[in-house]
Amino acid sequence: DYPKTARSVMTLYNRIVKGYYGGEATDEQIEKLVDQMQYLLDEDLLLVNPRDQYYQSVVADIKKYKQEKTVLLKTDVADSNDIKYINDKKEGTTEVDELAYVKTSYFTRTDGSFNTTFQEFVLRKDDKGRWKIIAFYEIEGDDSDDE
């Protein structure tokens, strides 16, 4: 079943990412994870990120992680109360996109040192009512997120 909320989509996304970069996935598992990831992406994002291109990018990133001795240790998704929902009117139309902005964090170890990065994802509800990832970008972490 497809995840019902924007937060649950991002929780699944992070499970897939942890599978990629956790350091233990086989080539066959990576192929399956890529296919699962594609299912979470919005049609507009898929147009600029076709499956084969995306797969090659993931494989290159995994190789880089291994060369740099980087392991993804932990991921986190914002609490439901911290997700921002907006209705965005499509320019020149009366149509409205339902968007959700979800913050995530990624805790990694690289050759003995630790790092946390933060990203914000934009999800859009499709015509079947499913939240799909349309964009993401790195953000600064809040002081309250620092440990």
Image (spheres, rainbow, N blue to C red):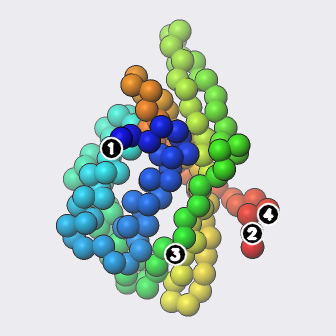
Residue 56 in which image quadrant? bottom left
For marks 3 and 4, the one nearer the N-term is 3
Marks 1/4: CA distance? Answer: 34 Å
For marks 1 and 3, the one nearer the N-term is 1
- Dot 1 amino acid type: Tyr
Marks 1/3: CA distance? Answer: 24 Å
- Dot 3 amino acid type: Leu
Local secondary structure at mark 2: loop
Marks 3/2: CA distance? Answer: 16 Å
Residue 129: horizontal and vertical position, in percent? Answer: 44, 27
User: CB under 8 Å between callouts 4 and 2?
Assistant: yes
> What residue would you read off at disc 3?
73
- Which residue is at 22% across, 53% downward? 52
- Dot 2 amino acid type: Asp
- Dot 4 amino acid type: Asp
Marks 3/4: CA distance? Answer: 21 Å
- Which residue is at 55% across, 65% downward? 75
Local secondary structure at mark 4: helix
- Which residue is at 33% across, 43% downward? 39
> What residue would you read off at disc 2?
146
> What residue would you read off at disc 4?
143
